[in-house]
Image (cartoon, grey):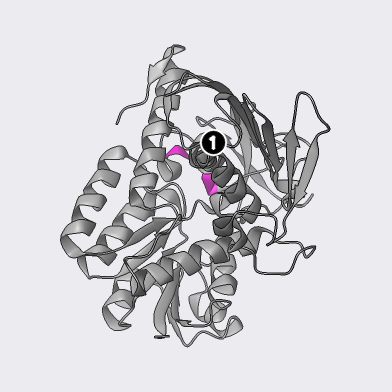
Amino acid sequence: MKELRAAVIGVGFIGAVHIETIRRLGNVKIVALCDANGAKKKAEQLHIDKAYTDFKKMIDECELDAIHICTPNFTHYEIAKYAIEHGVNFICEKPFTTTVEQARELIVLSKEKNVTGAVNFHNRLYPITNEMHQLIRENEIGDIFSVHGEYIQDWLLYDTDYSWRLEKNQVGKTRAIADIGSHWMDLAEFVTCMKVKRVNAKFRTVYPVRKKPVGQINTFEHSTEEQQYENMAIDTEDEAVVMFEFENGAIGSMMISMVFAGRKNTITLSVAGSKKALKWDSEDSNNLWVGYRDRANESLTKDAFLLHDRASRLGSYPSGHVEGFGDAFKNVFRQFYDSLLMPEGEYEYAKMEDGLREMLLCDAVFESAQSEKWVEVQE
């Protein structure tokens, strides 16, 4: 198989995950990285030959097949546009862009330039979440009545917790919704094979003023007792609750929080049908709860011989061997790079159109929270 050349832009927490995961593919070589802070040192530590602080220069010089965009939200559009204009494919962390208009523009441009783009909504490519999708696609749970769940974390629980993700000029209109709510909404629509028709949302900013550490602090890091602070006004949401109406009339709800003590990164998705119900929990990611009315409930454990074929192919390890966060990333990256070499194949990773869809959903949720009314999701 042809070896492909890749580079990663932004080497914080998630960029490092990308680098580790790309290396598991076998036929993709990371030839460069780009970072605004300490690029040379990071390249040396990660054994990557070339380091850049200017992504344009890197794209111009490195003859890349693809880049991975792991930078703050407000930079995604500029980087993706430059890559498309230079014929370089890309995988972008969510959200795709910060505005719907930017997303639409990039989709049009990518078709003109024949460039492939993906958005890393990795939760759809766990074996068990994909099994839920296959069960519903084949009508094995019956008519869907309701869909609900949560994405909750505690890394911003204290008013001294701070990150660039809190600042609207870096993340766009929404914070918790764009950052983690978009993951849940993509998963819900993918799993159920249904689109959300309209939404009704309520936001809450728990700390209208936070204490921002003086000096640099990275996402998910905690400050020390000796840390000096400055007060910063916060105009993005710490938590949100959203009600949904799906296109088939099913109703649903989603709880999003970055201030939920004790939950580090918990996603749950429940789907109730006329024949049975399903539930997945990211903290028990290799098992699927299956509920019945008139027989004992079941727990389906990831097993290549028990899952549908498309879901079983996402397993990296034998039955009983746990698969997790990095493995879901690997499934996205594997499908993405395979699609560059074999465009005619069937792939389930989130494409640019899915990134646009999440922008439309986020906009509708934001508008609803501002107006305190039901809002239709635009196409």
The one nearer the camera, 44 or 93, is 93
Magenta span: predominant SS is: helix
Residue 334 x %, y %:
49, 69
The magenta-colored residue range is 164-168
152 displayed left or right of 46: right
167 within the magenta span: yes
228 within the magenta span: no
Residue type highlighted by circle 1: Asn
Residue 10 x %, y %:
48, 65
Q: Quadrant of the N terminus?
A: bottom left
Q: Quadrant of the C terminus?
A: top left
The one nearer the camera, 150 or 97, is 150
136 displayed left or right of 5: right
Q: Residue at x 46, y 49 (%)?
A: 94
Residue 51 falls in image quadrant: bottom left
Residue 31 falls in image quadrant: bottom left
Q: Is residue 304 above or below residue 4?
A: above
- Determine which residue is flagged by label 1: 139
Residue 47 x %, y %:
56, 86
Observer able to see residue 373:
yes
Classify mark 1: helix, strand or loop.
loop
Q: Residue at x 26, y 78 (%)?
A: 60
5 displayed left or right of 149: left
Residue 316 falls in image quadrant: bottom right
Q: Residue at x 48, y 37 (%)?
A: 189
Residue 344 x %, y %:
32, 65
Q: Is residue 81 above or below residue 176?
A: below
Q: Label 1: how many residues lie within 10 Å, few (<14), some (14-19) or many (20+)?
A: few
